[in-house]
Image (tube, helix red, strand yellow):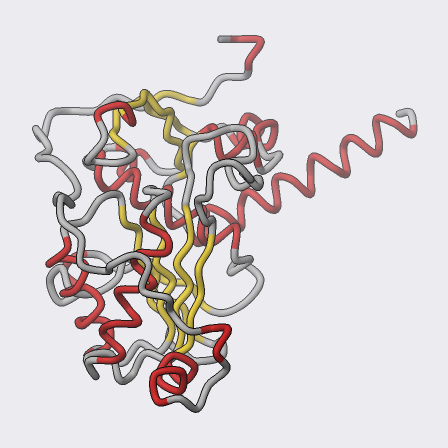
């Protein structure tokens, strides 16, 4: 075996180990994510299962309709409705981008364990401001967003990571949380991290867009916001009020599942497709 072959073998083994870590914490990812993360060849080697499903990544935008190939180690996860497939892929994107696989304890929360729809999609423990709430937003309605945030606070979550597939929403959700802090409705929440979440693009979706004026991430701290309002904080972090957190036109995420049988196949390499 040549030196190059040995190096390739070592690299492939490392990639397989990383992919096993991904699936030890997450249920579903997309082939676009695997390619972007450099784990495509590892997925072929592991013989993961895949299913092509049409989803709308932003439920308010018909132009966001896409055929995505979802990947999992278990057929049961791939048989779930499209809403769950995209939420789980979004959770995996947060898990990867925030490096939660190497820090903290990650747990996906199912409906029956989330006290209805008011609890987050996942939680993280073992980090500062424990516990964290992780939420995937593909186009929630305004009332639902408020209910979710208040429910997280009532459950004792201290840090909220709100990941949205709607780029324009990044700052707006942050401003909404600021308003709820001012109203005293999120007293247990200390920090938020609102971020754009893309699980469908193979290329880097988070690169700077100087002519786009859309934020990829927006963060805030309760003490800072309240200090600014009281006049005790630095002027340069104050909200200028240029955009209102009271916006309309948001619809509920997800459509009904027909409950039909779903077929999953073994992911094939490019040479076989």
* x then y, percent, for residue 144: 13, 57
Residue 22 appears in the figure: yes
- Residue at coordinates 32% horizontally, 20% vertically from top-left? 67
Q: Quadrant of residue 168?
A: top left
* x then y, percent, for residue 235: 48, 78
Give 108 or 139, whichever is nearer the viewer: 139
Give 239 or 262, whichever is nearer the viewer: 239
* x then y, percent, for residue 267: 45, 22
- Residue at coordinates 19% horizontally, 80% vertically from top-left? 183
User: In the image, is 252 to the left or to the right of 63?
Assistant: left
- Residue at coordinates 69% horizontally, 39% vertically from top-left? 13
The relative height of residue 252 versus residue 147 in the rendered view (above or below) is above
Q: Quadrant of the N terminus?
A: top right
Residue at the extreme right: 3
Residue 113 appears in the figure: no
Give 241 or 144, whichever is nearer the viewer: 241
Residue at the extreme top: 272
- Residue at coordinates 41% horizontally, 45% vertically from top-left? 197
Q: Quadrant of residue 244?
A: bottom left
User: In the image, is 106 to the left or to the right of 18?
Assistant: left
User: In the image, is 170 to the left or to the right of 119?
Assistant: right
The relative height of residue 272 versus residue 113 in the rendered view (above or below) is above
Give 193 or 248, whichever is nearer the viewer: 248
Q: How many marks?
A: 0
User: In the image, is 195 to the left or to the right of 119?
Assistant: right
The relative height of residue 203 versus residue 184 in the rendered view (above or below) is above
């Amino acid at each position: 075996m040549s030196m190059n072959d040995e190096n390739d073998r070592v690299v492939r083994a490392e990639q397989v180990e990383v992919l096993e870590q991904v699936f030890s914490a997450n249920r579903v990812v997309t082939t676009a994510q695997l390619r972007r993360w450099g784990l495509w060849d590892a997925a072929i080697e592991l013989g993961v299962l895949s299913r092509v499903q049409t989803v709308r990544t932003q439920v308010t935008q018909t132009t966001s309709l896409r055929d995505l190939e979802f990947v999992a180690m278990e057929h049961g996860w791939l048989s779930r409705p499209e809403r769950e497939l995209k939420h789980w892929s979004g959770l995996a994107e947060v898990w990867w981008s925030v490096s939660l696989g190497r820090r903290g304890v990650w747990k996906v929360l199912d409906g029956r364990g989330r006290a209805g729809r008011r609890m987050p999609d996942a939680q993280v423990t073992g980090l500062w401001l424990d516990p964290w709430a992780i939420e995937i937003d593909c186009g929630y309605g305004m009332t639902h967003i408020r209910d979710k945030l208040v429910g997280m606070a009532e459950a004792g979550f201290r840090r909220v990571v709100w990941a949205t597939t709607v780029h324009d929403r990044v700052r707006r959700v942050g401003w909404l949380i600021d308003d709820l802090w001012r109203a005293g409705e999120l007293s247990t929440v200390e920090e938020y991290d609102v971020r754009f979440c893309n699980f469908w693009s193979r290329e880097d979706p988070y690169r700077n867009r100087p002519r786009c004026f859309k934020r990829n991430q927006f963060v805030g701290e309760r003490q800072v916001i309240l200090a600014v309002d009281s006049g005790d904080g630095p002027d340069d972090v104050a909200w200028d009020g240029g955009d209102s957190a009271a916006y309309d036109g948001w619809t509920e995420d997800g459509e009904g599942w027909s409950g039909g049988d779903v077929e999953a196949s073994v992911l094939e390499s490019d040479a076989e497709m």
